[in-house]
Image: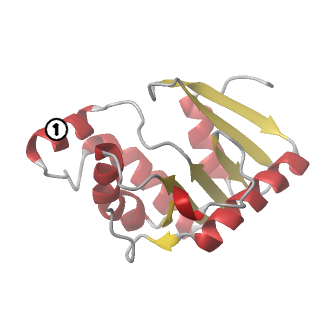
Amino acid sequence: MERPLTEDDFETLLSNATESAIHLELRDAYMADDSFTAWLRTGVVVDDDPADAWWRSVVRAAVARGVGVKRARVISEPVSDYVRWEWACTEPVNVAAGEKVRWLPRHLTTGLCVPPSDFWVFDSQVVVWNHFSGAGEWSGHEVVRDPHLAENCATAFETVWDRGIDHRDYRPS
C-alpha cells in the first residue's frame, strides 16, 4: 500500500486524466445511501440528484477534454435490488455525463483473470483500488503509481469490457 486516497485526490486524478479513466466494479451491493433507500421505498430514480452533480460535472469535463471514461460492472443474475437501482441510475448519471457503461453477468466471466477488488486506472499509469467491507461499506482507497500494475489491470478490464453488454442493450433479470 502506498497511501490512502482522499476524495479530493480522486477528483484531481479524474480532472487531470488526459487519455483514459476506466473503472471495474465487481460487487452486487455497496453501502446503502439515501438515494438507494429512497428508490427502495418509491421506485423513483431522482434524475438530477444534487449528490451526483459533482460526478456529472467532473466526468463531463474529462470527456470534453477527450478522455475516454468507461465503467464495467460484473453482476450476478438474478440481480440484487442494489444492481437494479444502479442500472436505473446509470442513464441519468453515468451515461448522460459521457461515461460508457457495460454490464457483464458473472456467469459469463468463466476463464477471465480479474483482480478481486474494484479499481480505477487513470491514463494507464495509476491504479486506485476501492476497498469495501463484506457488507459493502466503504473502507477506503489505495493509490498505486505502477505502470506495470496499471497495464495488468487495464488488460483485465478490457477482457471484461469485451464480453460486456452495453448499458442500453442490457436488461436486468
How many discs appear? 1
- Asked if one can make out residue 66 in the rendered structure from this viewpoint, the answer is no
Q: Residue at x 77, y 45 (%)?
A: 126
Viewed as shown, does residue 47 lie left or right of 77? left
Work out which residue is located at the far bottom of the displayed protein and give it: 169
Viewed as shown, does residue 144 lie left or right of 41? right
Viewed as shown, does residue 32 lie left or right of 70? left
Q: Position of residue 58 (x, y in %)?
A: 49, 52
Q: Quadrant of residue 78?
A: bottom left
Q: Position of residue 120 (x, y in %)?
A: 65, 47
- Asked if one can make out residue 16 in the rendered structure from this viewpoint, the answer is yes
Looking at the figure, which quarter contains the N terminus?
A: top right
Q: Quadrant of residue 29?
A: top left
Where 60 sits versus 168, above or below?
above
Q: Amino acid at mark 1?
A: Ala
Where 116 sits versus 163, above or below?
above
Where 144 sits versus 102, above or below?
above
Viewed as shown, does residue 126 lie left or right of 47? right
Q: Pick whichever, 84 or 36, lies toward us.
A: 84
Q: Pick whichever, 63 or 155, lies toward us.
A: 155
Q: Position of residue 62 (x, y in %)?
A: 56, 60
Q: Quadrant of residue 28?
A: top left
Q: Mark 1: give few (<14), some (14-19) or many (20+) Cα within 10 Å.
A: few
> Which residue position is annotated with label 1?
38
Q: Residue at x 40, y 45 (%)?
A: 54
Looking at the figure, which quarter contains the C terminus?
A: bottom left
Q: Position of residue 104 (x, y in %)?
A: 52, 63
Q: Residue at x 50, y 66 (%)?
A: 102
Q: Residue at x 87, y 43 (%)?
A: 146
Q: Secondary structure at mark 1?
A: helix
Work out which residue is located at the far right of the displayed protein and give it: 148
